[in-house]
Image (spheres, rainbow, N blue to C red):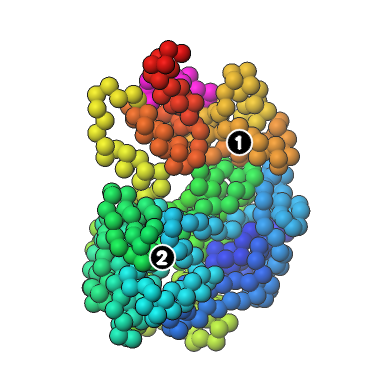
Amino acid sequence: MNAEKVNVLIAGGGVAALEAALALQSFDDDRLDVQLLAPEPRFWYRPAAVAEPFALGRVSSFEISTLAAQAGAISTPGRLVSVDSARRIAYAKPGGAMEYSMLLIACGAVPVQAVNGALTFRGPADTGLIVKLLGEIGDGIVRRIAFVVPFGAAWSLPAYELALMTAGWASDRGMDLDVLLVTPEDEPLQLFGKAASGAARMLLEARGVGVHTGSYAAEARDGELLLVDGAVLAADRVVALPRLQGTRIGGISQTFDGFIPVDSHSRVVGLSDVYAAGDVTSFAVKQGGIAAQQADAAAEAIAAAAGIGVEPRPFRPVLRGVLLTGDGPRYLRGDLAENDERSEVSEEPLWWPPAKIVGRYLAPFLSRLSGAPVETERSPENGLPVDVALDSDSVPERRDRLVRRFLEEGHPEPGTPTVGDVMEREPLLVAPEDTLGEIAERMSELDRGSALVVEFGRLIGILTSRDMLRALAGRVHSSEARARQWMTADPISVNADDTLEAAKVMMAAHRIHHLPVVEDERAVGMVGLRDVVQREFIPMAIGLGL
């Protein structure tokens, strides 16, 4: 491969995609041909969206084709829909089949409503929503407002910014407005550590924002915000951040929420020459700076695989953030791996250039395009270089694990039916390299609707009839497509001693019909919705004489 052209296809047009293109350009090697498959014609600088309604900032956008050209790449409009990794072909709409040597999936995530009845703030598309809300506050229609970080949210900072700026906007105009911030975090901005949490709490108190930590919003209705624990908060309007989901890509193993598991060099687990970076990956923190760091790791790994003399460094997440308050930004950093010893908050930049999106290549690149001064060779006075790591145990909990934690807080009575009472104790187990054709035959013979994918005795995925249907719709060859490519990775699971009620809630909450039963990561059974319903039906049937 050393003397050959290497066609690098980057699917996406956001932070991770552009950072990767710029990182590959920095190697200055003619062997690399980079193509950007972008679903949208423009790149939007999303972090400024919270400031725009308050006339404190402006959302900028750039033509993707222009950015790609300056990054040394060719831009093609289209959305990645499936991948044939064996043949190194990506399929796009529009665009059809596209050959590649290396593929980087950086297509981001889709925001979805997290709190029923609440206004969902997703970014630039919803700045008009906040402008309208400010108008209602000014007219006296809204006197109580709650900003919500929903459970399972990937990035909480915008909720704090909206709360602070709304409170400041009302105060500056002499308006009487009750502002609440509701978050499942134990402390404000918990990811950034003690110093940042303390500073955030002081800012919120100074602005008169009521803070409800450790609180899980369930629904907004009739001037109230209902919490999961039954508490009720008065709120004329509720603004919630969204929950993110990944877009399904045929031939790529994804989690139940559509995210792609990757290794420390951003390689898609189990596939060669396929990488992923940014919000589409299963890393829990979804933030521009983190996406850029994943893209850098992927670019170095791609360059090394192409024969360029570079030692690829693993992805080491460093958390940085700028909190917009309406009264000057606060620069935040957190080192959760160091027991909060190095967390810090400052009115001076802690990195340079002081952008909201912190990318090694993208930040100065966008600064040059926007005409802002760029001084990448020095840190500002009173600034500190940042090189801190996020502990993987400190990232936000996955949504299914939060649901499980709620269920475990209950204390079932003795004799309560458990999963172990009804589970299938000999589930169909398959290997990740088994073909879909082989698995379909076994599922048909055993009359099973799903199979558990195990590797070295450890459960790594589940393959359901729905997954099989997706593969069939993608016109894959059943004798060539493998379980690893089409399974749902890192599946939601239960234990044998969990109650049937807990299993039912898990299936209903995530809209699934099968749950693997595990013990020490080893698959020991399977429970389906039919098993739960039949168990509930038996006592009723006996009582009716059926």
Labelled pair 2, 1 in contact (Cβ < 8 Å)? no
Residue lying farthest to the top in this orientation = 545
The segment highlighted magenta reads 419-429
Task: Please tell me which residue is depicted at 58% across the width and 52% down the height of the picture.
Answer: 247
Front residue of 128/314: it is 128
Q: Circle 1: is it few (<14), some (14-19), or many (20+) Cα within 10 Å?
A: few
Tell me the mark number nearer the camera, choosing from 2 and 1.
2
Q: Circle 2: is it few (<14), some (14-19), or many (20+) Cα within 10 Å?
A: many
Q: Amino acid type of disc 1?
A: Arg
Residue 219 location in percent, x, y? 39, 54
Residue 191 location in percent, x, y? 32, 61
Snapshot quadrant of residue 323: bottom left
Mark earlier in primary sequence (2, 1):
2
Residue 285 location in percent, x, y? 42, 57
Snapshot quadrant of residue 70: bottom right
Q: CA distance from mark 2 to mark 1?
A: 35 Å
Task: Please tell me which residue is depicted at 49% across the width and 62% down the height of the picture.
Answer: 291
Front residue of 245/370: it is 245
Q: Which residue is mark 2?
A: 239
Q: SS at mark 1?
A: helix
Q: Amino acid type of disc 2?
A: Val
Q: Which residue is mark 1?
A: 466
Task: Please tell me which residue is depicted at 33% across the width and 73% down the height of the picture.
Answer: 143
